[in-house]
Amino acid sequence: MLIGDNTFLGVSHLSQERARDRTDKLNLESILEVIFSALSCGATGYTFSTHPINSQILGALGASGKVSGQFDLYPVVPYVESYVRLANEKGIVGVINEVLSRLSISDKAKLFVEGSFSALRFDPFGLFRTYLDAELKGYLGVRAKNATLQGVLLAEVLTDLCLGFQETNLLNLFAQHVRDNYHASPGFVTYNLARFVRLFEEAGLSLKDIIIMTPFNSLGYQMSPSRDACERSLSSLREGQVIAMSIMAGGYLGLDEATDYISTLPNLSGIAVGVSSREHARATFSKLREMQ
């Protein structure tokens, strides 16, 4: 049962006004209170994008000394929206400086050497690996001592782009890099579970240690090509770990409606859900704990 970070970033699928209202009420201290409330009611970890606020959150959690018991981390890379905005404001150089600002001098030197070799060899996959390492370094370096990196997930923007082009090389390279360098499970966020599973099967790639984070809700919200297709794909899975997200359909469903549907699904390994207050956290994760 994972805490999602959308509400902390001011993301609301219902309205931008609602998102701004939430963000105005949340600061670092109140976000920590929400997380502690969720953990006390059964949440076991945090899934987050590499947005700068999450570096502050992880650092504050680590410094608090209050994180005890199970606390698993599932970062999602890259946070494309942040870099698009930054590139519009400061250009590509500004984006590079933002990534580098999170690294120590030794890490910057290592990144420069590895990136230079990849550039000289015209190795785009090598540059991609170097970028991932730079993206994650500043977040994992400030985590609480007992926070365990369980998985690293590729964001849906890149995952679903690969699905569209039937590009398995990048997906496989990402998975192997996560296994070899982070000793964690590789994962993918996708809005098209059926196509994702089919592409892996057609390419002869195993889903054995793969995490798939994908929407599941009774409205079929964000479930492509259809709710039925995603449900059939989930039912047929014999490998992999599926984590359901968007269980409340972006806020269109209430907690009871969401859990009534989710409880009927087979082969789910976990649920990720965002919460915006201590009361919301307690109600949500207490309800999810009853489903176990």
Image (spheres, rainbow, N blue to C red):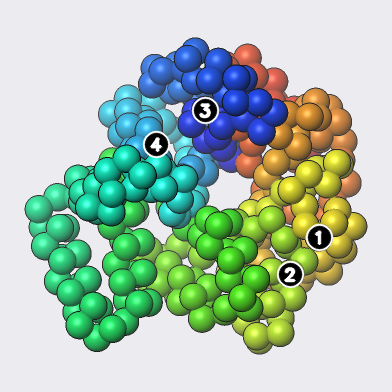
Residue 177 drawn above or below residue 123: above
Q: Earlier in the sequence, mark 4 or mark 1?
A: 4
Q: Is residue 51 left or right of residue 291?
A: left
Cβ–Cβ under 8 Å for marks 1 and 3: no
Q: Amino acid at mark 2?
A: Arg
Q: Which residue is mark 4?
A: 54
| Disc 2 packing (10 Å; few <14; some 14–19; many ≥20) | many
In 3D space, how far apart are the residues under numbered discs 1 and 3 (Cα atoms)?
28 Å
Q: Which x, y percent locates residue 268?
A: 74, 53
Q: Which x, y percent locates residue 218?
A: 86, 42
Q: Amino acid at mark 3?
A: Gly
| Disc 3 packing (10 Å; few <14; some 14–19; many ≥20) | some
Q: Which x, y percent locates residue 39?
A: 54, 29
Q: Amino acid at mark 4?
A: Asn
Residue 96 drawn above or below residue 207: above
Res. 70 visible in picture: no
Badge nearest the viewer, 3 or 4: 3
Cβ–Cβ under 8 Å for marks 1 and 2: yes
Quadrant location, the C terminus: top right
Name the residue rendered at 87%, 36% in the picture.
260
Name the residue rendered at 57%, 79% in the picture.
168
In 3D space, how far apart are the residues under numbered discs 2 and 4 (Cα atoms)?
31 Å
In 3D space, how far apart are the residues under numbered discs 2 and 3 (Cα atoms)?
30 Å
Q: Which residue is mark 2?
A: 195
| Disc 1 packing (10 Å; few <14; some 14–19; many ≥20) | some
Q: Is residue 163 left or right of residue 140?
A: right
Residue 52 drawn above or below residue 113: above
Cβ–Cβ under 8 Å for marks 4 and 1: no
Q: Which mark is residue 225?
A: 1
Q: Earlier in the sequence, mark 1 or mark 3?
A: 3
